[in-house]
Image (cartoon, helix red, strand yellow):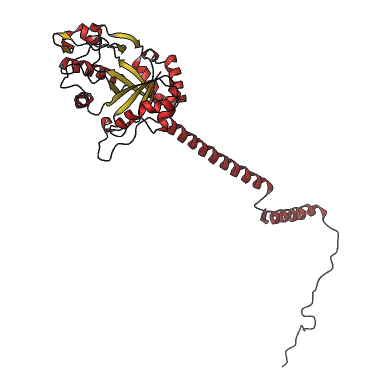
Amino acid sequence: MKKKRFYNNKDRNQKWTEQPTGRKIYFADKYINALEDTAEQSKQKKTKAPFFTKERRDKLLKNALLAVVSVALVGTGYTIMDIHMDRHAMPFVESDENSTANLNNINISIKGSGCQSLSLDGGLMLGAVIDTATDNGYTSLAFDLKRNDGTIGYNSSLATISSFGAISSPSSDLKASADLLKENDVLPVGIISCYKDNIAPAADLSLALFNGGNPFKDSAGNTYLNPDSQGVYNYIKSIIDETVGMGITVFVLDNYDLPEDAVQAENSGFDKLAEKLYSDFNDEIKLLKAVDLNLTSDSAKAIDEEWQEKTEDYTSNDANCVFCITAKNPVITKQYLDSKGITNYIIFE
């Protein structure tokens, strides 16, 4: 029996709707509009903003400019510091490869000026001297600890010096002065007249150099200490020992030889005295040999004739020598010495 179909396919796939009837419900519109606004905002959030906005670009340019300026300032600072260190460096140079690091084995290049002991007040007077020295390109300042006449140029507490009454026009504060010089990259150098002395031999004849039965005197009437006397050595050593404690480590020894017409002593000369002092002080001190010259000419051309022989004798053979020069025109003298490549000198006006 054939089944009866209740539906046919003639209206298949057709849209069937019922026409809306009635009136709108207006109170629900606000909810529909709110949903539409939320969807629009969500769509806007998903849209990415461009990376290089005007504000971000300006900020990046500002940061880059600050970085470049900072690097330039740091580089300039280091350059200025290098120039300052090169100009005001302490006058030590490297020692030979086979030598130790001891101070007495180090070669020292001294371009110094001399000053009176009274200027070493540790304050205003010394400050003016330092300014003059550095302005003229000097790296050291030399002053008398023991002068040619035997007087002492600092306030010593040694009993022998006190008993001799040898202190005259002294530095009021040698230790503070040495510290101030080092702070300003200026090397303090103490000068000691070794055997030429008019004070100690008169106070203690056991220290005097004799000629026959009387103390020896040179043509100018100066007396001398006896290099073979242990008391004389102890006297010189005690001055060095005391001033090392005040901050002096470099010493220029002067008048280490006796006059030709004096009775020659076995222990006279720079080398003999320096050997004994180095043995006692080890690496604490550096000793330099003074070569005295008196240059009174105003022109470098005239200086050249007086200077040539001395420079050939000492500059090529003895690194421990330092020229102690009394010059009428220190500026021209310094220019001449620098032009000749001479590095070890102290100029006195």
Percent coordinates x, y for residue 236 in the rendering: 23, 17
**Occupied quadrant, residue 134:** top left
Q: Which quarter of the figure is the C terminus placed in? A: top left
Q: Residue at 29% across / 14% down in the picture?
A: 148
Q: Quadrant of residue 237?
A: top left
Q: Which is more toward the observer, 53 or 74?
A: 74
Residue 245 is at least partly visible in this image: no
Locate the N terminus and report the quarter of the image it occupies: bottom right
* Residue 341 place in picture, x, y as percent: 39, 33
Does 230 sit above or below residue 66? Answer: above
Looking at the image, residue 340 sits to the left or right of residue 78; the answer is left
Is residue 265 rendered to the left or right of residue 34? Answer: left
Name above or below for residue 50 compared with residue 143.
below
Q: Nearer the viewer, residue 17 or 344?
A: 344
The correct choice, above or below, for 31 with respect to 246 in the image is: below
Q: Is residue 84 visible?
A: yes
Residue 121 falls left or right of residue 276 = right
Location of residue 313 by image quarter: top left
- Left or right side of 139 for 289: left
Q: Residue at x 17, y 15 (%)?
A: 231
Residue furthest out toward the left = 213
For this orientation, the residue located farthest to the bottom is 1
Q: For this rendering, which residue is in front, 58 or 234? A: 234
- Towards the viewer: 264 or 299: 299
Name the spot of residue 116 as percent of width and height, x first.
38, 15
Q: Number of numbered discs present?
A: 0
**Residue 297 image point, x, y percent:** 42, 21
Q: Which residue is rendered at x = 80% and y = 83% of the image?
A: 10
